[in-house]
């Protein structure tokens, strides 16, 4: 048969159509016939999905390093359930599209049992739909706004309610009621500010200004001009990454006085203060569950061990790294508990690990910030929020620590949306909705 | 967010201060764009690695200041020399072979920018670094509401100096005459005995050197990390394209863009200001694609 160009083209189009229609059925593996996630005699593969390049690399580079450090530590102590752990490290390049591309690759091609990743809510929300569609498991190891109720994500950082509850009353009491909100322009700062406003209202504070800069933006003088016009008692900052350093540097250059109008931040940790110079960081406040200077034997071991390891080139440990470190141990306990339930390691699935992770505890002997545990309903973490003040050497001094553990409440300012339970969001009308983003 | 939250109410003194901030923004945009104007204007080379030259300038300041202990002010000319040297190597090694293929230059310089970013990351790591500002620049000029920090005043002065020196070199020296002759018609200039290749080398070195000085100051003012170049390249191209790829045009366009940005940011917010600005630029370039001021010159 002679094939003309036209028939060839027609064939190609119809072929592509068949493939496009057929492909989804073709590629979703049927769970009953799928290979086990963990094979006996092999290694347990986990995904490590952080940005090593781009403007989020400032923080996420450390996240990668600390996950690798934790995995080395676990492997050296006999691994998980007697098996070694093998990290599959991927660079997400600070690009939302790359996060969603790479999570598919990790799940489908590399067949990792779970993935650790992300520092911004934008990246978490990019991977979440894929993780949920595959019924997989994602560890989001840093603070976020809450407002979600998924069955496939475990979080080891503080929620907005755990941040604001102590910080806002503390600042209002010590510096005055007027606050200027400055944040990066994406969902977490906006939701955190909503939360902060609720707490402000309770203690009689008021918002005198609210501004957002694009991610990676580094020009704050127009905002500081308005700050000077409004004369707030303090600045509440949710600026992230490299922008945060420019914010503090320019605050200092503008000649603002830290004892008159300090910045209360949810993000400015040890790594940022080092890059901005201690003179720009000193005197400002940070709400976090962990600081490098915390005095307990576990933290001492963590700081010394990490900085001496090949991953410790950054020279500091900060709250985001510690939360990431915890997430690896939460995962380890989860796998072991799932194995105890299933009996056979080849039976363990990502969802099974998630379902047994409620109430999993990381004790004083491992957790540098002290004992923490996973909430059995919403799978966020119970912790003790602390307020630290940056000292002239760039390290933080704990000014105030909560006496009791504070529970995570993802719907704290959205009670009308319902209550988050393990099986889904229990809505006020009595229905249960799963995978709520 | 209600309308009242979105619009900042007008108040005279803060508004005047916004105009002064605008001058500071102008100086930053102009410094970022100056080297690009020279290289693009003279050679027709669209240098995608310009932002990375700025980044390298910032890192040379970091190395000179932190690791060797040279004072900040001396770092500026040294960064100029270091970047001019790097520019010379790059011009000889890469750009020279691509003069007749402008699109390939675009790709080559973009590839170069990736190599430079990754190289710096390998050597210094991905985390941000610290460049100190000398203590004598830690002052503020203050008159009622009018407010300007010492470092920003210094950058404004430096912008004026850099433009003046560039103008002098281009319009008051024999070398400048040669450069402008090559700009207008390379073949004709060559027939008068001007070594066009040497002129290209020199302008590329000079443009790269200017980027180096820019980097030194930006490192002190903002954040110093391997990917910092990406933020400046957009502003620099905007200034150059709107200006019409020549010195006076760049000064004019930087002035317009900087002030507009500051005024919009004052009345609304920074994100919205950028949106308005980019929209205006798109509309403007639709009406006048050759830019604000465009010299008559041959297309290369």
Image (tube, rainbow, N blue to C red):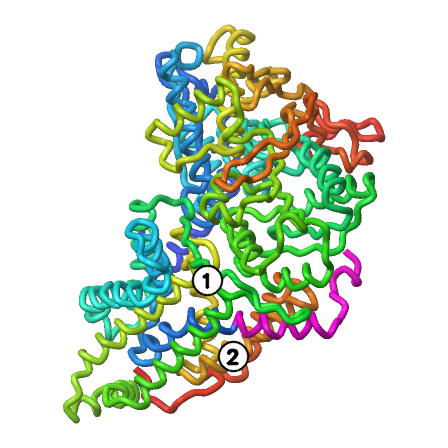
Describe residue A412's horizontal placement relative to residue B123 as left or right. Answer: right
Front-lying residue, A253 or B171: A253
Q: Estimate the x, y position of residue A156 in percent, counting from the top left.
A: 58, 27
**In the rendering, which numbered label is found on residue B285?**
2
Q: Estimate the x, y position of residue A386 in percent, counting from the top left.
A: 63, 30
The reply to whether residue A435 is visible in this rendering is yes
**Mark 1 residue element:** helix
Residue B85 sits above or below residue A322 on the image = below
Q: Estimate the x, y position of residue A24 in percent, counting from the top left.
A: 52, 37
Residue A126 sits above or below residue A367 on the image = below
Q: Residue at x 42, y 71 (%)?
A: B31
Front-lying residue, A277 or B252: A277
The reply to whether residue A11 is visible in this rendering is no
Q: Quadrant of residue B290?
A: bottom left
Front-lying residue, A374 or A363: A363
Q: Residue B23: within the magenta?
A: yes
Describe residue B236's horizontal placement relative to residue B149 as left or right. Answer: left
Q: Which residues are magenta?
A: B1-25
Q: Residues within 10 Å of mark 1 (few under 14, many from 20)?
A: few
Q: CA distance from mark 1 to mark 2?
A: 43 Å
Q: Which residue is mark 1?
A: B136
Q: Residue B85: within the magenta?
A: no
Chain to which mark 1 belongs? B
């Amino acid at each position: 048969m002679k094939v003309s160009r036209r028939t060839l083209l027609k064939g190609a189009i119809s072929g592509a159509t068949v493939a496009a229609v057929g492909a989804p059925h073709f590629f979703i593996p049927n769970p009953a016939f799928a290979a086990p996630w963990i094979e006996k005699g092999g290694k347990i593969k986990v995904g490590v999905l952080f940005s090593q390049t781009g403007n989020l690399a400032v923080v996420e580079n450390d996240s990668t390093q600390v996950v690798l450090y934790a995995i080395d530590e676990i492997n050296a102590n006999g691994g998980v359930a007697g098996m070694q752990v093998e990290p599959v490290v991927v660079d997400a390049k600070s690009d939302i599209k790359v996060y969603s591309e790479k999570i598919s690759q990790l799940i489908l091609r590399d067949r990792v049992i779970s993935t650790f990743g992300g520092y911004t809510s934008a990246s978490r929300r990019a991977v979440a739909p894929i993780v949920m569609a595959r019924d997989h498991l994602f560890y989001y190891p840093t603070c976020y706004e809450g407002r979600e109720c998924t069955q496939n994500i475990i979080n080891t950082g503080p929620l907005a309610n755990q941040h604001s509850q102590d910080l806002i009353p503390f600042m209002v009491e010590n510096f005055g009621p007027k606050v200027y909100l400055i944040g990066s322009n994406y969902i977490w700062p906006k939701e955190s500010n909503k939360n902060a406003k609720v707490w402000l209202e309770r203690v009689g504070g008021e918002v005198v200004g609210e501004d957002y800069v694009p991610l990676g933006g580094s020009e704050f003088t127009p905002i500081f001009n308005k700050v000077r016009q409004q004369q707030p008692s303090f600045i509440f900052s949710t600026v992230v990454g490299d922008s945060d350093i420019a914010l503090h540097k320019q605050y200092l250059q503008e000649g603002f006085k830290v004892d008159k109008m300090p910045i209360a931040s949810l993000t400015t940790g040890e790594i940022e203060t080092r890059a901005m110079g201690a003179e720009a960081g000193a005197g400002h406040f940070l709400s976090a569950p962990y600081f490098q200077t915390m005095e307990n034997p576990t933290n001492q071991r963590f700081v010394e061990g990490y900085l001496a390891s090949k991953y410790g080139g950054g020279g500091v440990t900060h709250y985001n790294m510690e939360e990431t470190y915890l997430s690896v141990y939460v995962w380890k306990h989860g796998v072991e508990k799932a194995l105890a339930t299933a009996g056979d390691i080849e039976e363990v699935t990502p969802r099974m690990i998630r379902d047994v992770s409620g109430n999993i505890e990381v004790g004083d002997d491992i957790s540098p910030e002290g004992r923490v545990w996973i909430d059995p309903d919403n799978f966020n973490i119970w912790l003790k929020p602390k307020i630290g003040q940056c000292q002239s050497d760039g390290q933080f001094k704990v000014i105030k620590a909560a006496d009791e553990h504070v529970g995570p409440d993802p719907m704290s300012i959205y009670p009308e949306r319902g209550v988050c339970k393990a099986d889904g969001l229990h809505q006020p009308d009595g229905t249960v909705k799963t995978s709520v983003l | 967010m209600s309308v009242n939250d979105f619009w900042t109410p007008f108040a005279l003194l803060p508004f005047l201060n916004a105009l002064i901030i605008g001058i500071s923004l102008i100086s930053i945009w102009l410094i970022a764009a100056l080297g690009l104007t020279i290289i693009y204007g003279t050679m027709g080379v669209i240098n995608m690695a310009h932002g990375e030259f700025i980044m390298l300038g910032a890192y040379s300041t970091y190395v000179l200041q932190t690791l060797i202990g040279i004072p900040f002010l001396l770092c500026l000319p040294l960064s100029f020399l270091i970047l001019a040297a790097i520019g010379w190597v790059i011009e000889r090694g890469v750009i020279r072979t691509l003069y007749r293929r402008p699109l390939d230059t675009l790709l080559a310089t973009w590839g170069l920018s990736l190599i430079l970013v990754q190289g710096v990351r390998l050597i210094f790591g991905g985390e941000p670094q610290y460049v100190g500002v000398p203590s004598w620049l830690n002052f503020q000029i203050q008159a009622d509401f009018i407010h300007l920090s010492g470092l920003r005043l210094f950058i404004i002065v430096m912008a004026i100096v850099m433009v003046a020196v560039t103008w002098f070199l281009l319009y008051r020296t024999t070398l400048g005459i040669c450069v402008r002759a090559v700009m207008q018609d390379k073949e004709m200039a060559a027939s008068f005995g001007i070594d066009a290749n040497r002129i290209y080398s020199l302008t590329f070195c000079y443009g790269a050197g200017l980027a180096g000085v820019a980097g030194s100051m930006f490192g002190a003012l903002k954040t110093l990390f391997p990917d910092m170049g990406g933020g400046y390249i957009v502003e620099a191209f905007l200034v150059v394209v709107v200006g019409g790829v020549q010195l006076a045009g760049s000064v004019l366009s930087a002035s317009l863009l900087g002030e507009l940005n500051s005024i919009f940011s004052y009345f609304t917010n920074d994100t919205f200001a950028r949106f308005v600005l980019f929209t205006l630029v798109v509309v403007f370039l639709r009406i006048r694609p050759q830019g604000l001021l465009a010299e008559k010159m041959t297309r290369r």
